[in-house]
Amino acid sequence: MPDETLLSDEQMKVQEAIRFFLTECCQSQLGTLTNSTDLYNAFSNWWLQRHPSAPIPSHRLFGTMFQTHGIKRKKSGGKYYYLNIVLQDDC
């Protein structure tokens, strides 16, 4: 995880939001692949419910901050996937 003193205020806010998103909307599941766009879209919807007046973080920033939580990413068939994580049905 990067040194938090080197993160911008925006990055820290997104990193904290992702921590809550992971707790509320995701589950660890070995051997699974979740499309990065599907995960970002779920995060965007989650973000809008909690921060309706704040702009949604970019997909790029989401991906960078998401990986600081130790979640690995893999490219396959021209698409990116996150390993060993799935979205819960209610998110």
Image (cartoon, rainbow, N blue to C red):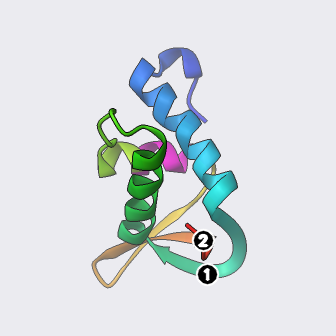
Q: Residue at x 32, y 43 (%)?
A: 56
Residue placed under numbered mark 2 in the picture: 90
Q: Is residue 8 above or below residue 14?
A: above
Amino acid beneath label 1: Thr
- Main SS, magenta region, reads helix
Q: Of 74 and 20, which appears nearest the observer? A: 20
On the picture, is 14 further left or further right than 87? Answer: left
Q: Residue at x 50, y 26 (%)?
A: 12
> Can residue 86 be found in the magenta stretch?
no
Task: Single out the mark in the foreground, 1 or 2.
Answer: 2
User: Is the C-beta separation of discs 1 and 2 under 8 Å?
Assistant: no
On the picture, is 61 further left or further right than 66? Answer: left
- Note whether residue 86 is visible: yes
Q: State the mark number for residue 32.
A: 1
Q: For the C terminus, which image quadrant?
A: bottom right
Q: Position of residue 17 (x, y in %)?
A: 54, 39
Q: State the mark number for residue 13.
A: none
Q: Is residue 35 above or below residue 41?
A: below
Q: Which contiguous range is marked in magenta?
A: 63-68
Q: Residue at x 69, y 53 (%)?
A: 23
Which element carries disc 2, helix, strand or loop?
loop
Q: Is residue 61 above or below residue 33?
A: above
**N-terminal of the two: label 1 or label 2?**
1
Q: Position of residue 83 (x, y in %)?
A: 58, 71
Q: Toward which corner of the image does residue 42 lie, by quadrant?
A: bottom left
Instruction: Give the CA separation, mark 1 to mark 2.
Output: 18 Å
